[in-house]
Amino acid sequence: MKGELKIYNSLTRQKEVFVPQNPPHVGMYVCGPTVYSDAHLGNCRTFMFFDVVYRYLKHLGYKVRYVRNITDVGHLEDELAGEGEDKIAKKARLEQLEPMEIVQNYTNGFRHVMRQMNTIPPSIEPTATGHILEQIELVQKIIDAGYGYESNGSIYFDVLKYAEKYPYGELSGKVLEDLQNNSRELSGQGEKRNPVDFSIWKKASPEHIMRWNSPWGEGFPGWHLECTVMSTKYLGETFDIHGGGMDLQFPHHECEIAQSVAGIGCVPVKYWIHTNMLTVEGKKMSKSLGNSFLPHELFAGSHPSLEQGYSPMTVRFFFLQAHYRSTVDFSNEALKAAEKGYKRLMNAQSLLSKLNYTNVGTVDVELDNQINEACENCYKHIDDDFNTAMTLADLFELSNKINAFSNKQLPLASISEATFNRLQTTFHAFVTDVLGLKDEASDNSNDGLMDGVMDLLLNIRKEARANKDWATSDKIRDELKEIGLLVKDSKEGSSWSVL
Ligand code: AMP
Ligand code: ZN
């Protein structure tokens, strides 16, 4: 039974009943990747979770417009201080490529990984560089409203002036005086009236490659600005849901609120949702800490600290086992357990599809109730702020019953036909539609021809490896990957799966 969805709103710090502004429409914006390097597994956790939100809202019958941007300009190395090189420009300089080549390359890679993880592409995937004019317009509006000032060709947001009239720090729980005290020592505040001010337009230094004309000279937009512009352009001045990782609450999302209030005249978002971090030995997985795992390293088992490879659906299952507001620590043991859990669920799904309800016997009321209750609990738990961990527990309870029906421990006729139908519908809806788990084993099933061809290729590759002919071995692996087939190497030999 579909119930009442409650969402923990980071802004109010409480669970609230979800009421869209304009039902059946729902607008959801999620901060997308900065495409200067490969997305790591931490990033995947956040995007996979919002995929579940998207899927569940659609399952409830809402017409969802899901906007997830691509950050392809303006994200500086040190956003807190508003300092450093643009991440994409820096990569372009280091690799001697056009910035847009960097952007295209990592955008392709990101989309590929999102497909592997079985996430549904967003309705709109706008880029920051595609919305420069709108960003310049918003900067102008903020200046006109009296909250932006020019300094040496850059435009800064006047946080102190804003805070005289509006709350600043409400979302992140930051106190302005503390921020002021903490930021005094930071360098590069010379241009700003106050160290807490943030740039909404940056003057491009002569060597800066990514630059656009503006009323204030050549420059580029501040990072926070793009999300304000693209979310409100496609979802309206105030929209339903804004998501991202917790690390974006401050300064990014706090600044988004300030920009909207100052420049557009309204509070942008009704429900803020923030995911917690994927950690490694308790530390946030991040590119800068050097503790990140890339999805392909995990799928192929090629990372030195992995004992084996784990399939994309195992990883998806692993993330679903935790509540999105808890941290998840990455470990071989946890992944192995997830692999088992995922296979158990897929096995139950396959058994369920083979069960045939034919004859009605005497209904075992207690068993019948247990199944109905577990089906109801799937909704109850996902409705409780997307508690996917509890929803999985409900599905396992149903799996136990399915196994018992399948091996005739329990007669199928001891539940009513209506209950059986409900079991089938609910199980399928949750596993496939809502949680987005697909059966990788059946994905690989084919008429045997494919297996034969792959065996042949893997044998040729094995021979090449034995002859230390790494070029041929890598060519086979890489070209198979390009056409969507993943070769996994382990101590036991090589295997393959569909990406
Ligand atoms: P970025 O490409 O760094 O802008 O990050 C893209 C998204 O991934 C943002 O929503 C981040 O908050 C999120 N993110 C970054 N690191 C992690 C992590 N270790 N665990 C979960 N989410 C993360
Ligand atoms: Zn953003």
Image (cartoon, helix red, strand yellow):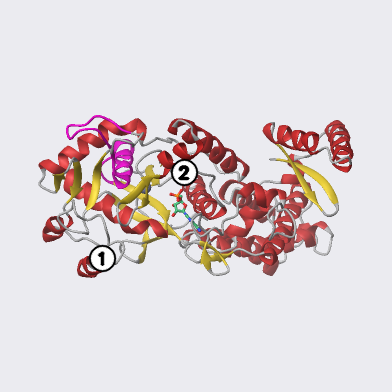
Q: Of residues 142 and 411, which is closer to you in this image?
A: 142
Picture disc at residue 61: 2
State the quadrant of the C terminus.
top right
Where's residue 379, x and y in %?
Answer: 53, 58
Residue under the image location 58 percent in, 46 percent down: 433
Q: Which amino acid does label 2 sit on?
A: Gly
- Per the rendered image, the range of residues in magenta is 211-238
Picture disc at residue 185: 1
In magenta segment, residue 18: no
Q: In which quarter of the image is residue 172?
A: bottom left
Q: Of residues 254 and 213, which is closer to you in this image?
A: 213
Where's residue 387, x and y in %?
Answer: 52, 62
Q: Of residues 482 and 406, which is closer to you in this image?
A: 482
Disc 2: CA contacts within 10 A as few (<14), some (14-19) or many (>=20): few
Q: In which quarter of the image is residue 254?
A: bottom left
Where's residue 334, x and y in %?
Answer: 66, 65
Give SS at disc 1.
loop
Taking the image as shown, residue 369 lies to the left or right of residue 359, namely left
Choose the circle earlier in sequence order: 2 or 1: 2
Picture disc at residue 28: none
